[in-house]
Amino acid sequence: DADVTQTPRNRITKTGKRIMLECSQTKGHDRMYWYRQDPGLGLRLIYYSFDVKDINKGEISDGYSVSRQAQAKFSLSLESAIPNQTALYFCATSDSGGHTEAFFGQGTRLTVV
Amino acid sequence: EDQVTQSPEALRLQEGESSSLNCSYTVSGLRGLFWYRQDPGKGPEFLFTLYSAGEEKEKERLKATLTKKESFLHITAPKPEDSATYLCAVHGSSNTGKLIFGQGTTLQVKP
């Protein structure tokens, strides 16, 4: 089983719909992240959380919200999806003990039509 | 502002033809430089962490090196299965806990 699991893996939704992407991890890490990846733009940070009560905006948080339901769960919501939110979304985790390498999920490919 | 620039954007090699990928960075207080491999449609897979200039790490045909301004990922005698996008990221003291990624180098190794 994957250490970082994202659901769904693929999703097509219509403009204006609300959609939630979910992430769960079994690594026991405190820190969780949501990134989006677009061709030519690399990985950009949307939101990050250092523990259940700590949520922070990344560089491109507009149009997104998150919820840290438990140490192991971190969900990303698009309140009203728009076509330029079509991208590959990744959840990642890292620990807080000095080793900051992040471990990524397999990604969610989201298409907004 | 922390920045990471990778070059080239794309690299085509023949099997066995060694080469290097470059990652130039600007960061206030480097706490770590990371290399990842990403296959199409999959999440990045962690390869190496380098913490200080002069440090080197090796794994199979890959060797990562670090100076105060850049890192190199050397690929020795590559095989087709080394084809992937290689991502570089930095963690700086002004971005506690966050990784800043470069745009990646897409490597294609032809048999």
Image: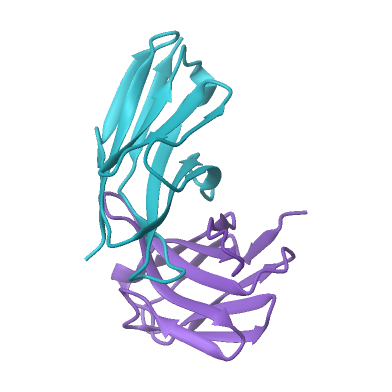
Chain colours: A purple, B cyan
User: Compared with residue B19, is residue B35 higher up or lower down, i.e. above or below?
Assistant: below
Q: Which quarter shows the N terminus of chain A?
A: bottom right
Which residue is found at the position 52% from the left and 79% from the top? A49
Q: Classify residue A21 by image quadrant.
A: bottom right
Image location (x, y in percent) of residue B107: 38, 28
Task: Judge left or right: residue A28 versus residue B55.
Answer: right
A96 vs A35, left or right, is right
Please, is residue A17 above or below residue B105 in the view?
A: below
Q: Is residue B60 above or below residue A101?
A: above
Name the image quarter holding residue A99: bottom right
Q: Examine the rendering and report whether any part of residue A21 can be seen.
A: yes
**Farthest-out residue, right:** A1
Name the residue located 36 percent from the left edge and 76 percent from the top edge. A58
Q: Quadrant of the C terminus of chain A?
A: bottom left
Near-viewer residue (B27 or A68): B27
Q: Nearer the viewer, residue B70 or B107?
A: B70
Q: Position of residue B48 (x, y in %)?
A: 52, 41
Q: Is residue A65 visible?
A: no
Q: x%, y% of residue A80?
A: 39, 85
Q: Nearer the viewer, residue B25 or A61?
A: B25
The residue sitting at 26% across, 36% down in the picture is B9
Q: Position of residue B74 (x, y in %)?
A: 40, 24
Q: Is residue B103 above or below residue B99?
A: above
> At 66% across and 69% down in the image, what residue appears?
A29
Q: Residue furthest bottom?
A: A53
Counting labels gives 0
